[in-house]
Amino acid sequence: MKNIMRGAFALSWLATVNPAWAQNGIDEQINSAIKPAADAVAGFIFSSFPVGGVDIPFVLVWLIVAASIFTFYFKFINFRAFKHGFHLVRGDYNDPNAAGEVTHFQALATALSGTVGLGNIAGVAVAVSLGGPGATFWMILAGLLGMSSKFTECTLGVKYRNEYPDGTVSGGPMYYLAKGLAERGPGFAKLGKVLAVLFAIFCIGGSFGGGNMFQANQSFSQLVNVTGGEASWMADKGWLFGLVVAACVGLVIIGGIKGIARVTSRIVPFMAVVYVTAGMVIILANITAVPAAFGAIISGAFSPEGVAGGVIGVLFQGFKRAAFSNEAGIGSAAIAHSAVQTNRPVTEGIVALYEPFVDTVVVCTITALVIIITGTWDPGVDPAAGVQLTSDAFESAIGWFPWVLTIAVVLFAFSTMISWSYYGLKCWTFLFGESRAADFTYKILFLFFVIVGSSMQLGSVIDFSDAMIFAMAFPNVLGLYFLLPVVKRELNEYWADYKAGRLQRTR
């Protein structure tokens, strides 16, 4: 712990003693240096094709098609196992003697903290503005389909995880891609290794950017907005905000997954209650407008005169926001779910069904309703101004609500950072080995990028990191297709025991 804090202090020293370095020009220099490569990578990952006059990114189709196939292949597991998933999350079948480090609830909370974030606040506002209220319908549908993707990848994450003598575990796509495909023969073993390495590289890149710098940057922006904007005392103190957040993140991630799980199992329910309550207050205060809002959502979803390209444009905006928000098919959450205490991999797959449901069907829908009811959605919105748009929607109802939103934004960002630190760390140690040196190096780099993200406007870096996160979907989903029979065997065996009453309840 002392070494981590010393390292964090050493890396942040320059920004602390010379904040002008962090504010004057260095962000532009980094942008200029990285922009060509970042644009090329982002352009490739988000390459698109026209449908109905709308450019649809191939990665989005890749994710939605996979989610649909998994839903039918497992006979709508997202609905038929929903009730049992609640019993698992509640702890009815917890086995304290099973391998693993955290409970079902803690694993779910950790994974949720990585997905319930600024995408639910800023991204939904942008989706509704650009796609109209109808985008909400497709967002919900994509969230329901994404539940099947989470089930598939999280079941495999537990099945192929590494379990160590000290009780710790490591799991995720990099392990099930390498180990699972190796079971199919030498040729598949080589493919699995390549896919696993690619996934790990992409995940590390995403953890530093979208899972770290973007979160710190946007939460600082919201804090500045509610404290006076450009006239705020905090306006040029991004480095100071970053230091405070880095210190808090460092104290949590030092404890590994158990420390992260303890924090997220408290923060996630609290921040969800704060944000959902705030949204529900606005919705209830405008209860007479709710029927019209739902009418706009349904009619807008199928209206040929819809915003941004008719039905295809509305569908695209809804699916895009759901995919960016819940990350179903990306594979990141499987890393957190793999740490669960269980000897039956399918149990965590079933628990994971709740992640897209809470993230997209509940939280994103509440955000969308607030935007629609208050009439603050703007077809000409700047995609970078999503947080401000949602803040305006909340403020239009009750003047002090932006402060509530600020609390939610900071908590969302903080929890996302600590979860992504774990994702990136597990991929880092997969590539460089399970050692204290590797662990220490990654954590120091992660804390440094918290400060960088708060201090700079790194547009190109963020674009690159977003591309890295969605690049994870290509090796992950490809491997999932090959491993579907494995998941089906696990599910059939477990479901037969469940229906026959052979599962042992612990509460």
Image (spheres, rainbow, N blue to C red):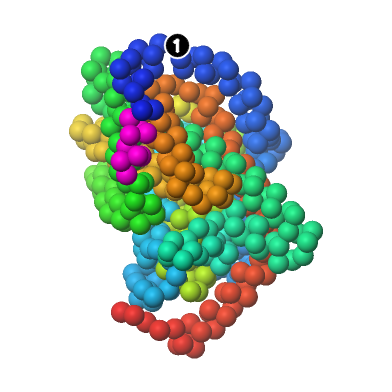
**Residue 339 location in percent, x, y?**
45, 61
318 lies above or below 88 = above
Displayed quadrant of residue 186: bottom right
Q: Which residues are magenta?
A: 1-9
Q: Is residue 335 above or below residue 205?
A: below
Residue 184: percent from the left, percent from the top? 74, 66
**Chief SS of the magenta region:** helix
Q: Quadrant of residue 413?
A: top left
Front-most of residues 375 and 197: 197
Q: Quadrant of the N terminus?
A: top left
Residue drawn at 48 percent across, 28 percent down: 383
In the rendered image, is residue 122 in sight?
A: no
Asked if residue 278 is among those painted magenta in the image, a careful observer would answer no
Instruction: For the C terminus, give its image quadrant.
Output: bottom left
Q: Residue at x 64, y 24 (%)?
A: 37
Give the number of marks.
1
Residue 342, by quadrant, is bottom left
SS under mark 1: loop
Q: In this view of the protein, which residue sits in the foreground, 199 or 224? A: 199
Give x and y (percent) for residue 398.
21, 35
Q: Say which amino acid is labelled 1.
A: Gly
Q: Residues within 10 Å of mark 1 (few under 14, many from 20)?
A: few
- Nearer to the camera, 219 or 283: 219
Q: In the rendered image, which residue does mark 1 sit on?
A: 25
Give how far across and how far down residue 24 sits, in percent: 40, 11
Q: Identify the residue at image location x=58%, y=64%.
A: 160
Residue 232 visible in the picture? yes
